[in-house]
Image (cartoon, rainbow, N blue to C red):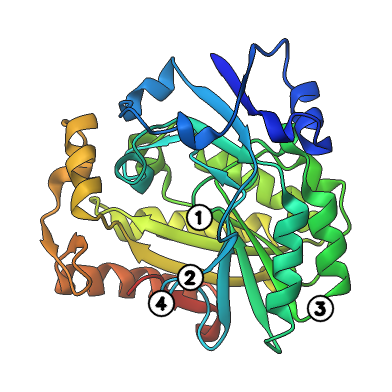
Amino acid sequence: MFQKILVEKNILHHPNTKKILNNLKDPHIEIIESYEDYWGKVKKPYLQKRDNLFLFLAKKKGQLIKKTPDAYGTDGDNHFYFIHAYNCIYECEYCYLQGYFHTPDLVLFVNHDEIINEMARISKNYPSVWFHAGEFSDSLALSHITDEFDIYWDFFKKNKNAKLELRTKSVNIKNIMNKEPLENIITTFSLSSSQSSKEHDLKTPSTNARLKALKKLSDKGFQLGIHFDPIIYQENLEKNYDKLISDLLEKVNIDLINYFSIGVVRFTENVYKEVKKNYPSSKIHLGPYTKSFDEKIRYSRPTREWMLSKIKDLLIKNGIENKKIYLCME
């Protein structure tokens, strides 16, 4: 998967570094002073991730946990995201990372103990608080290599006022399945219709594969969440999502689904410029798009409201309570 692995000198003997290197087959390692001296210093085209991907192992410096944007999670709660990695092995046409960083190369941070300490500090200030993983990287895709979840499970088992959301498109759930289901750890999957997934979610597990992973977690009693995000306009949108919701609820215990978020595809100007360059013939460009209330490029408000209301109506028709549904970044 990785052409080269670059490891910061100061974390070479860190237990988590050793664990990662042991889980990689015959890695070609280069020792460096700091990942920041190399990573993204020279612009590397996003699509080079297909055949020329580097992996950096590093210590995250600076702010480890950040406040989320508005409408990122459920209403009325305090939401933060923590940074355990940069970039993703998957390739989705709409991915904002292609216009966010100057490189597709991955960084895995190993100082999870410091992230936990910061979570403990923040948790003391709130009666209820959320921590989200997966803002800059899929939270499960490389979990068989990083194997960092023991320390997080221990923290959230002891701190009931804190909740952890693991956001993913991965079916790499082996390390989760070996854990004890906790009420305050929620594994959430981004799902789109089979048509949309085939057209836009490149090199990711199929919708059907994600549904099978959800069933395995549901059967063991894990708390779950669903993100219908981003929704991309397509013919038969209502029919396709009606089938997706029916297929999901056939496999998953509805009582274990904590929430559904729904949101339409959206871009910053920089990201959309990269999307047009990287995927010029994609149906994602059918739009039409307009600059929205937050300067992001979205469908027009009437189109968005029609799409979101259709999906929300389908959820309610299938027995989902209104209070479990929220609009993401709207």
Task: First in sequence, mark 3 or 4: give its number.
Answer: 4
Marks 3 and 4 sit apart, C-alpha to C-alpha, by 24 Å
Q: Residue 160 carries which label?
A: 3
Split into 4 quadrants, where in the image is the C terminus?
A: bottom left
Which mark, by number, is residue 68? 2
Q: Where is residue 62 in the image (x, y as percent from the top left)?
A: 56, 57
Which sits earlier in the primary sequence, circle 4 or circle 1? 4
The Cα atoms of the two marked residues, 2 and 1, are separated by 9 Å
Label 4, label 2: how far apart the Cα atoms are: 7 Å
In x, y percent, where is residue 226? 55, 62
Q: Which of marks 1 and 3 is nearer the N terminus?
A: 1
Pointer 4: what residue? 70
Image coordinates of residue 282 in percent, x first then y, are: 21, 35
Identify which residue, 257 or 17, lies in the foreground.
Answer: 17
Other residues around mark 2 within 10 Å, as few (<14) / some (14–19) / many (≥20)? some
Asked if labels 1 and 2 touch by Cβ distance under 8 angstroms, the answer is yes
Which residue in the structure is indicated by mark 1? 135
Q: Are marks 4 and 2 in contact (CB under 8 Å)?
A: yes
- On screen, residue 315 versus residue 16, left or right, reads left
Q: What residue type is labelled 3?
A: Lys
